Image (cartoon, coloured by chain):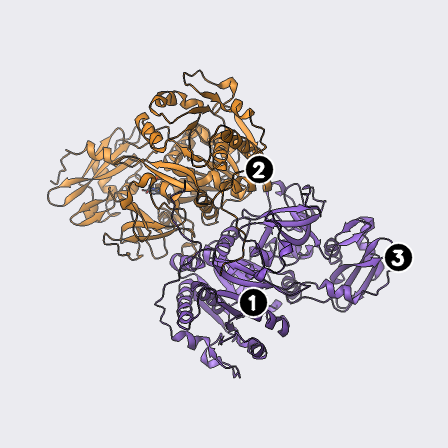
Chain colours: A purple, B orange
Amino acid sequence: MRGLMQDWPLLCSKVIDHAANEHPLREVVSRSVEGPMHRTNYREVRDRALRIAQRLESEGYGLGDRIATMAWNTWRHLECWYGIMGVGAIYHTLNPRLFPEQLAWIMNDAEDKLIFVDITFVPLVEALAPSVPSLKKVVVLTDAAHMPETKLKNAVAYEEWLKEADGDFAWRSFDENTAAGMCYTSGTTGNPKGVVYSHRSNVLHSMIAQAPDAMNLSSASRMLPIVPFFHANGWGIALTSPMTGASLVMPGPKMDGASVYEILTEERVTCTAAVPTVWLMLLQHLEAHGGDLPDLERVIIGGSACPRRVTEAFQNRYGAQVVHAWGMTEMSPLGTLCAIKPEYAGLEGDALLAVEEKQGFPPFGVEMKVTDDANRTQPRDGRTFGRLKVRGPSVAKAYYKNQGAELFDADGWFDTGDVAHIDQHGYMQITDRAKDVIKSGGEWISSIEIENIAVGHPDVAEAAVIGLAHPKWDERPLLVCVRKQGREPSKADLLAFLEGKIAKWWMPDDVVFVEEIPHTAAGKIRKTALREEFRDYVLPTR
Amino acid sequence: MRGLMQDWPLLCSKVIDHAANEHPLREVVSRSVEGPMHRTNYREVRDRALRIAQRLESEGYGLGDRIATMAWNTWRHLECWYGIMGVGAIYHTLNPRLFPEQLAWIMNDAEDKLIFVDITFVPLVEALAPSVPSLKKVVVLTDAAHMPETKLKNAVAYEEWLKEADGDFAWRSFDENTAAGMCYTSGTTGNPKGVVYSHRSNVLHSMIAQAPDAMNLSSASRMLPIVPFFHANGWGIALTSPMTGASLVMPGPKMDGASVYEILTEERVTCTAAVPTVWLMLLQHLEAHGGDLPDLERVIIGGSACPRRVTEAFQNRYGAQVVHAWGMTEMSPLGTLCAIKPEYAGLEGDALLAVEEKQGFPPFGVEMKVTDDANRTQPRDGRTFGRLKVRGPSVAKAYYKNQGAELFDADGWFDTGDVAHIDQHGYMQITDRAKDVIKSGGEWISSIEIENIAVGHPDVAEAAVIGLAHPKWDERPLLVCVRKQGREPSKADLLAFLEGKIAKWWMPDDVVFVEEIPHTAAGKIRKTALREEFRDYVLPTR
Ligand SMILES: Nc1ncnc2c1ncn2[C@@H]1O[C@H](COP(=O)(O)O)[C@@H](O)[C@H]1O
């Protein structure tokens, strides 16, 4: 027997319609790529998205077409997503920080037909276009007055292009499992792999993300997503904000400390989301220039492990609650968030910070477990680590064109490639990437745990731990540090600092100081490069 | 092209599994029907629900079978829901306050095969059973020690019955549109009509309900659903609490003022939900005996219009936020909630209370519009009222056995039978039931609006307004009041009190005082009975 409830497919157009109907005048504020601040609202965003959809369809784009965007977070980028999804086409966000060859490879793999691009990236698209034969059209996200000179054929200014549509259009309807978006993961080995979101997964992800123990967004929130839309589905915020009626404040191209401080305070942002590096820049700016954050209530930090001193500064100095979060492109992307359960209520100081260093627990809609290599579920004891596996309606079941099929279990669990433990209250903590874990004498050493502690040293700007081959122990840890400007910590200082904070056999065999640690386009430490760099390094204990 | 995200059907078993896995020790507290308080947690609830499922299946119950429950809110009732749903059977909640003939009619319509029943209602089931031939078994929700004498064949004590299952069982899997639950609406005309919830609609409803602008539940909440599970799907709380990890506190059979006060304070309840009459009883108790509500943060009030003085007392005297809500059995049941949008932020005193008298706005997942009789959408001006229509994934598309088909538009909108207006910020206010609206000289008068004001009179305990036939105007309003004990308000007092608060032509043509106003089993004013009672009453203006 079937239920007798309405067939109401979970389509992304319903999200922007909800915002336009129930929160029509709620502000959508952006720092424009051209410079000035720009203000609009959900009703206008919906109306312009309808015109994009109409215009796309009139040019023959529709169901299943991949349409690229290479753009900062602005109202125009937001409109594009909804316009594209509204005809059943697929937004494909490109990370402009990738190498041109990688971008061309990705665009060819996806067979992008049209690209929406910020003026900033027109030269990049000029360089790419000749090697992407599927690309038929370039829409530059600006108006006629700011349209740059370009040698691109078929390039048009967005506002001019949009003028030709009157908005008399209805969203197209289709099965909720239809593809809605696409984002490639920049695997450190092999080719990038495409993740394909569906309308259903996007809508469910936002319904998951809105929960109080997750992003906790409401119509009273003013949300600043600094995480770019092209990183891991932009943490889903382009959907969750309109779903909840939260005001959207968008940083455009400016994510330096001063600009972030300015937009946080002038736009009375209550909630924001970004990777730790952004927050380190903001905190440095605040230390240097003073200032406070009176409206800011919640800072969601993810993408890589959040250093304790960042959490401490926000909570103790600026009165904003930090919510540590973990996710992946393959998870739409939220996995866990570190809200405080009653079991941990009332903690203070270091005890609280120690909990907040964990990546937290999954909201309903994400299942997780930690297994050993034989796929046996590990106890939730806060110590025993293993492979972190997840399941859920907004978790990938495959990559585009069936790449990386080995990551998907027959029983439906996705192996995240992260190594983690879970404590007795269900709080997960990432201890490593599976490929970065250090195997010493048959036991695992968590590189991230050592890094987390090392960056707490007052003279250290950044730290990375890698495993180096060792004749007796298989691998032993090397600690690589970048010193803070004007500071001169020594190897002995660092080792003394670690002493007592980690197990004896976890102590790095050596400490080296470098000018710079290599990063991926998404700002994460590129450990493969680091291992390459230190391949022939000889550890003193050898 | 389809998305490549996991096929993870939205089944209710996932909700209780999530609670058991991620919030295993979170408390589930009940006042037992036998008397003492009972404490358990989500892990135990899940484990016992698995045993119920196992037991049901071993006796041949499964996919599509209707299984009745006639019970107060307790941990046992909760377990039954999940056990029943976990084998693909359908929980069918029965309202014990209905007349036995109505209950028999409903049970025969549903063809219930088994019933879980509280000891309180064993005599009722004894009376019913002979006229319900489909009923094969009666499980009495108690242990052997408390098992009442009964002449019922096939009656067994729940705890004994459960002992025969070891819990080695896996939830059954099926399409998410499979029926999960059933609840009859007590239509004032015609036979009761069955609403059939699906797993999908139940899960989506809870994902909608958890949002901060809706029920705002998290792992830190301690939720007391006073609204019985047998009223309008128990407002969905049996699902939303485990989904969010909120502690559940359940009142069992005791919903009088003293008992509610006791459980609110002793169990440190932070959030609670019930109809206005429950709150009137609590407030009367507090007025008489003193006391405060230090832990209570939020009171969700719906089912009928919440009088302003209730909101005022909670907010101004006891420091708890009132969230006025509107819904229907056909909507799983949430429709709108009155959170405060930024447009109304900062209001105080009467201005705030006036907003909170509205039923609020829909969360994502509920669409609403107000139309005139020709189905034209009315302006959102806060004045123009008409038929309230809704759409969404947890709104009914039909009744069981296709009764009442005329209420479902071809375009997918469900006509709620309520009359309402919507203001410029999207706040909906119910002005009447369509069948109760008073048609005077071609214009509509809102009976609820007059009632709301009349109960604000310090000497009035309850008020109802009905339309009486009138030779010139078609219908004219009659105000029927119950006086507070020991008070003697006159017709002139009431009319003077209304003066200036409503349009002149809305003024009741007469005021009468009665001992009692008739109510439905769900505690709502039974206007049909009242109109019947006053059918021959002659209005002075006639
Ligand atoms: N907050 C409210 N204010 C006024 N009427 C309400 C409210 N909540 C529910 N109702 C009425 O109750 C009906 C649903 O009844 P039921 O399905 O029995 O819960 C709605 O159609 C409304 O007429």
Q: Looking at the rendering, in which quadrant would you find the C terminus of chain B?
A: top left
Between B353 and B397, the one lying in front of the other is B397
- Front tag of 2 and 3: 3
- Label 2 residue SS: loop
Residue B509 vs residue A378: left or right? left
Type of amino acid at the residue the image marks with label 3:
Thr
Type of amino acid at the residue the image marks with label 2:
Arg
**Mark 3 CB within 8 Å of ligand 1:** no
Marks 2/1: CA–CA distance: 42 Å
Q: Quadrant of residue A187?
A: bottom right
Which chain's residue wears label 1?
A: A
Estimate the x, y position of residue A157 in percent, counting from the top left: 46, 78
- Front tag of 3 and 1: 3
The crowding category of the residue bearing disc 3, from other C-alpha atoms within 10 Å (few below 14, some 14 to 19, many at least 20), is: few
Among numbered discs 3 and 1, the one appearing first in the sequence: 1
Above-or-below relation of A483 to A407: below
Type of amino acid at the residue the image marks with label 1:
Glu
| Residue positioned 54% across, 60% down in the render | A196
In the image, ligand 1 is in what quadrant?
Answer: top left
- Label 1 residue SS: helix
Estimate the x, y position of residue A439 in percent, counting from the top left: 78, 53
Q: Which residue is mark 1?
A: A262
On residue B26, the disc is 2
| Residue positioned 47% across, 30% down in the render | B60
Q: Which residue is mark 3?
A: A541
Estimate the x, y position of residue B138 in percent, counting from the top left: 44, 24
Q: Quadrant of residue A542?
A: bottom right
Above-or-below relation of B484 to A316: above
